[in-house]
Amino acid sequence: MRDERPLSHVSRPVLALLAAGLALQIALHAAAPQPRAKAPDLMPPPATPLLRLAGLGEPIALAKILMLQLQAFDYRSGSKIPYKDLDYARVEAWLARILELDPGGQYPLLAASRLYAEVPDEARQRSMLDFVYRQYLLDPNRRWPWLAHATFLTKHRLKDMGLALKYASALQKYTTAKDVPAWAKTMEIFIREDLNELETARVMIGGLLASGRITDRGELKFLDGRLREIEERLKQGAGKKKR
Amino acid sequence: MLRHILPIARYTLLEARRNRLLMLALILVAAGLAFTQFLQQVAITESNQIQAALLAALLRVGAVFMLAAFVVTSMVREFNDKVMELILSRPLRRSSYFLGKLAGYAAVALALALISSLPLALFAPAARVALWGLSLACELLLVTAFALFCVLSLTQVMSALAAVAGFYLLSRSIGALQIMAANPLSDTLSLGQQLVNSVIDAIAFLLPGLDRMTQTGWLIYAAPTAAEIVQLLAQTAAYALLLCGAALFDLQRKNF
């Protein structure tokens, strides 16, 4: 217990001062607008060396906090057009800086492919998907899930089969880790099939089966079935795709 | 009352001079200028802005740290040397002693704000630097009052300095914390999340908005608006009143 005098020793003017100060502080705070990260407030990011300097030797911690800060910009829960006022070039620059600070972090690419690329604005979608593609190329074995998602979005939302093929080809070509599931690496085959490039698809499935990289029985059976189906279609003169 | 306050304030200023606090501030300015000169050499563009921004940030944090350390150590020395008890044994109100100390430290804060602002005029328009300096003076005044309140309550260097550091960091980041808390990516909030958000909002009510004060953007992009300046002054006045009330409340209950 602290050695204190009773409350009665506190003079009235001091009590009044304390009460007035508290009331004023609460009133001022209540009158001030609630802090919100508005889109125009998003400034261009500083250079990576400066951010490293600001991180005081903790670039990963800085990257995490920057990511949490970035995602709050212009987000309105339930908004029909999320991020509509956001400058995507700046968002991209921030995401790139955050990845430079913490190359092992997956959050920026998750945000790019699942938040910023899923807006109802094709130009923005394309720019964000391209960002995911460029970042994937820097570390394919770790960042493949985001390009796989980008391929899915390109094919089904943008309906740009050429671009989807470019992404899927990159997935097939550059992802070399053994723990990558076969579905990610075989996306190119199915897109080629959709594009009626049956001969290429046939060669690719054949090559994949012959390489011995597919070991799962179910996957082997599935690919074998697709190979037969493509060969059948080729025999029939590369006609319509069977359902 | 003023005849008691002024000598205490004068001796506090004298102590700051003998502690070479202002000399230390000048050394910090010189080091900051040298550092930004180095950065100017490596910058390709916006070198003036880089210099202004980094020098401003460095001097702001440096001034806050020096002032808080000075207030806390000076007051703890007065406790340990029983100077405070000696002064209060005289026919003098405790509030006069407190206001005298506060006035002395506030004068030191003003001097530090002036020393920190002047070199920025090399890189930014003088009018903007003046407003930035005014804001820094307000910020330092609040840090002074909070440090005085902490040291009167805690009477220990480490605990008082830690409390001031925590207060300063939290006040500077509470806006960002509120923004992050208010923007969950899911539409439904769990009970825990709602509780955390309420706690953050409650803390924000009791802290001054230091994140809106002394912004570097005022130096390099645009001067603060009149409304921002009014808000800054009102915030300083309200929070200084609150801290004075709290410190006097504690001092009047203290048994020596």
Image (spheres, rainbow, N blue to C red):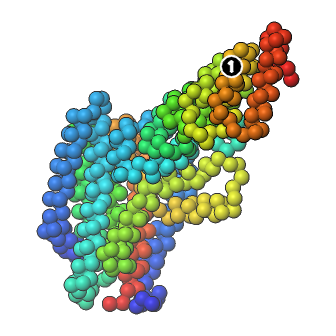
In front: B124, or A103? A103
| Quadrant placement of the N terminus of chain A | bottom left
Residue B205 can be seen, yes or no: no
Residue neighbourhood size for the residue with mark 1, other residues' Cα within 10 Å, grouped as few (<14), some (14–19), many (≥20)? few
Residue at 21 percent of width and 40 percent of height: B38
SS assignment at label 1:
helix
Q: Residue at x 49, y 50 (%)?
A: A65
> Which of the 4 quarters of the picture holds residue A37?
top right
Residue type, mark 1 in image: Val
Measured as percent of width and height from the top left, residue B199 is found at 58, 64
Q: Position of residue B62 (x, y in %)?
A: 27, 56
Residue topped by disc 1: A203
Q: Quarter-wise, where is residue B166 in the image?
A: bottom left
Circle count: 1
Front residue of B154 and A239: A239
Measuring 61% from the left and 48% from the top, which residue is drawn there? B183
